[in-house]
Image: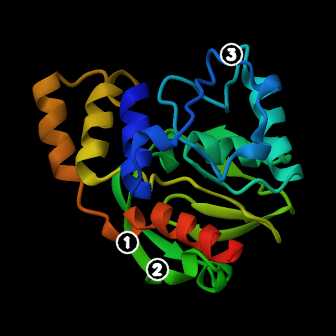
Amino acid sequence: MLGHELECFAAGCGLDSEAFVSLNLCQDTLDDVDSSGVDAVMIGGSGDYSLATGGFPWHAPYLDFMRRLVRDDVPTFASCFGFQALVQALGGRVVKDPASAEVGTFRIHLSAAGRADPLLGGLPASFDAQLGHNDSVRDLPSDLERLAYSERCETQAVRVRGSRVLATQFHPELTMQDNITRYVRYLHVYDARLSAEEALQTARSIHAPSPEANSLLAAFLSDLTQRRR
């Protein structure tokens, strides 16, 4: 999944994977990371860890790293696990809530702030996106502005007010096929009762294309480029 994650972000940005410096949060020491020389930071998901329950040794360093990105206003796009980390790092709450879990393709709706956002405002008011999460955000901190929501999940996208740091609960880096691959890979997290064949059949029934959401990463980089001109 490490390689798959990088490939998905690179494809979503319209870049080669060589354009990225890849860090493994489970292994790399974040204290020594210098973000001053990078164009943008992108943070993806993590099917084997939960910010709601914690207990892993790199939890606190991860949140410290997120706060550094906000403090330095480093252009950042975080999805799913990264989205939850941003909220938690700034004082919000992440909970394990099976009733709010979303696995597959779901409809996302922009809030009034989302429709006015320089990035998300370029999307339709409602669009499909790929999701895969058991934990959900509660008690959004005042530093974050809510940009989108879904029927099950009250917060689907946020931006740090007045900054270039934003995050989504959904996965703009994943196409329908990418999310099917993730679903089968993390079956032990979502539904361990299914066989691999049953999981693939289920995955095909709950996934659909998400072209609008998949356009976000390239639009994010394009916006950064235009701002620098």
Q: Earlier in the sequence, mark 3 or mark 1?
A: 3
State whether residue 57 is above or below residue 51. above
> Which residue position holds label 2?
123
> Which residue position holds label 1?
212
Q: Secondary structure at mark 2?
A: loop
Task: Please indicate, yes or no, whether residue 220 appears anywhere in the rendered image.
Answer: yes
The quadrant the N terminus occupies is top left
Give the amino acid type for the residue marked by disc 3 in the picture. Phe
Do the CB atoms of the residues marked 3 and 1 lie less than 8 Å apart?
A: no
The x and y percentages for residue 94 are: 69, 42
The x and y percentages for residue 189 are: 41, 26
State whether residue 180 is above or below residue 109. above
Q: Earlier in the sequence, mark 2 or mark 3?
A: 3
> Which residue position holds label 3?
56
Q: Secondary structure at mark 1?
A: helix
Q: Which mark is residue 93?
A: none
Task: Please indicate, yes or no, whether residue 154 appears anywhere in the rendered image.
Answer: no
Classify residue 184 by image quadrant: top left
Please tell me which residue is depicted at 74% across the width and 45% down the height of the picture: 37
Crowding at dot 1, Cα within 10 Å, few <14 / some 14-19 / many 20+, comes out as: some
Do the CB atoms of the residues marked 2 and 3 lie less than 8 Å apart?
A: no
Classify residue 144 by image quadrant: bottom right
Do the CB atoms of the residues marked 2 and 1 lie less than 8 Å apart?
A: yes
Please tell me which residue is depicted at 26% across the width and 36% down the height of the picture: 181
State the separation of the CA atoms marked 2 and 3: 36 Å
Classify residue 49 by image quadrant: top right
Q: Earlier in the sequence, mark 2 or mark 1?
A: 2
State whether residue 132 is above or below residue 61. below
